[in-house]
Image: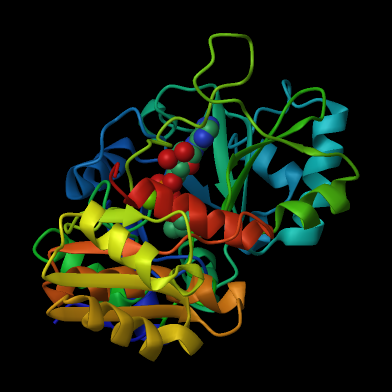
């Protein structure tokens, strides 16, 4: 058995495991992370091996709560005090006061203590202070900076429970700390702070973009993709295919309840009339009707997973990855995911995950 409840004894054992260069899967409020001592490149290399993660994809460093301030981060050479401008420092203070501990990752000039492997050789580093009490207890107990990507194999669905981690990484790691089901359910929002104080959205996630912009008093800029002009590029590692179930998943342009019977029939025909179908819908209110309508078309078996009730996006984010896993395990030959709204920002973050999880129609 390698899933351990978060007793004081187990947290101390996990801290010792990390100090000796080994990996521990840890709960955070967003998703489970696969942690190693960020300043030990041999330990960090084990993360890449266990996940089969390509080395161009940099890691986020998790900061112990007692060190989550500028003087300590500069003194520990996590951040580069020389390259940090006054306006960038001001943005850091405002955003960390408003969002830390929590699901906001900040990208800033990288300090000299960080091995190249962590940042894929970039001169910036991504840092966050997680809010989950077990993550906080482990960071405090170990007094280590922990590099931790999501604890799934590369490109697959992120884990939001200890059992998910086990199904992704069994045989590759020997220590999972169980902190229950993640309350946010999708990864942190990643924001790069430029020397001129501009904020760039590198990944939508658990922290609201509107709230970030409001706290900082400046807009959050969005990098333009696929251009050759001077716009800042997307975060490395933000691949178009990610979070993917094994079963081919198709993101629809509508919600099924908005389609007429004819339109539903056309959609089924467009996808070559699959006999078995898994469907990810937004609202549980539509679950029974959706199932009945698809069976009436002639689909032999239908599995429907709903994200939430009444467009509650907080709850939808919590359920997203578990619902995708359940559909993937159903045995359906293809999966459909309903269109999710593009606003507010939590819905946008969910839509981003679905887009990357799905194959072209
Ligand atoms: O919520 C989360 O952020 C979770 C939990 C475990 O904390 N972690 C997570 O890590 O999602 P991961 O490895 O799945 O995503 C890390 C992403 C990279 O793919 C890249 O897009 C971005 O963070 N990133 C890391 N360092 C960066 C840097 N220096 N510049 C730009 N983007 C960076
Ligand atoms: Mg990930």
Mark yes or no: residue 146 visible.
Answer: no
Residue at (32%, 41%) from the top-left corner? 241
Indicate the position of residue 145 as horizontal and vertical percent values. 49, 51
304 in relation to 61, above or below: below
Apparent side of residue 58 relative to residue 176 in the rendered image (left or right): right
- In front of the other: 105 or 77: 105
- In front of the other: 167 or 220: 220
Residue at (79%, 30%) from the top-left corner? 198
Residue at (46%, 84%) from the top-left corner? 286
Indicate the position of residue 292 as horizontal and vertical percent values. 30, 87
Indicate the position of residue 142 as horizontal and vertical percent values. 45, 63
Indicate the position of residue 96 as horizontal and vertical percent values. 75, 54
- Name the image quarter holding residue 354: bottom left
78 in relation to 103, above or below: above
95 in relation to 179, above or below: above
Residue at (60%, 34%) from the top-left corner? 77
- In front of the other: 333 or 257: 257
Mark yes or no: residue 170 visible.
Answer: yes
Location of the N terminus (image quadrant): bottom left
Location of the C terminus (image quadrant): top left
- Name the image quarter holding residue 150: bottom left
For the image, the number of numbered tags is: 0
């Amino acid at each position: 058995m390698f899933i351990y409840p978060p007793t004081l004894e187990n947290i101390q054992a996990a801290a010792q495991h990390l100090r000796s260069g080994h990996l521990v899967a840890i709960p955070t409020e967003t998703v489970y992370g696969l942690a190693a001592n960020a300043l030990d490149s041999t330990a960090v290399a084990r993360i890449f091996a266990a996940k089969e993660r390509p080395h161009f994809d940099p890691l986020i460093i998790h900061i112990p709560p007692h060190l989550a301030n500028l003087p300590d981060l500069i003194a520990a050479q996590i951040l580069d005090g020389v390259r940090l401008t006054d306006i960038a420092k001001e943005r850091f203070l405002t955003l960390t006061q408003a969002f830390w501990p929590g699901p906001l990752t900040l990208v800033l000039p990288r300090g000299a203590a960080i091995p190249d492997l962590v940042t894929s050789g970039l001169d910036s580093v991504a840092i966050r202070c997680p809010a989950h009490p077990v993550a906080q207890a482990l960071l405090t107990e170990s007094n280590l900076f922990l590099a931790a990507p999501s604890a799934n194999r590369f490109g697959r669905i992120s884990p939001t429970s200890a059992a998910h981690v086990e199904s992704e990484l069994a045989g590759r790691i020997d220590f999972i700390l169980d902190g229950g089901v993640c309350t946010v359910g999708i990864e942190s929002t990643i924001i790069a702070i430029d020397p001129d104080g501009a904020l760039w959205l590198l990944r939508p996630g658990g922290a609201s973009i509107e709230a970030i912009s409001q706290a900082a008093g400046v807009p959050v800029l969005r990098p333009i993709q696929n251009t050759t002009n001077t716009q800042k590029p997307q975060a490395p590692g933000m691949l178009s295919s990610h979070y993917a179930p094994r079963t081919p998943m198709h993101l629809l342009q509508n919600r099924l309840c908005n389609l007429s019977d004819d339109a539903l029939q056309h959609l089924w025909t467009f996808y070559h009339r699959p006999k078995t179908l898994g469907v990810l819908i937004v609202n549980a209110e539509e679950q029974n009707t959706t199932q009945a309508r698809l069976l009436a078309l002639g689909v032999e078996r239908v599995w429907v997973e709903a994200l939430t009730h009444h467009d509650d996006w907080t709850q939808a984010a919590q359920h997203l990855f578990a619902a995708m896993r359940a559909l993937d395990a159903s045995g359906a030959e293809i999966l459909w995911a309903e269109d999710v709204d593009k606003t507010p920002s939590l819905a946008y973050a969910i839509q981003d995950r679905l887009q990357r999880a799905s194959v072209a129609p």
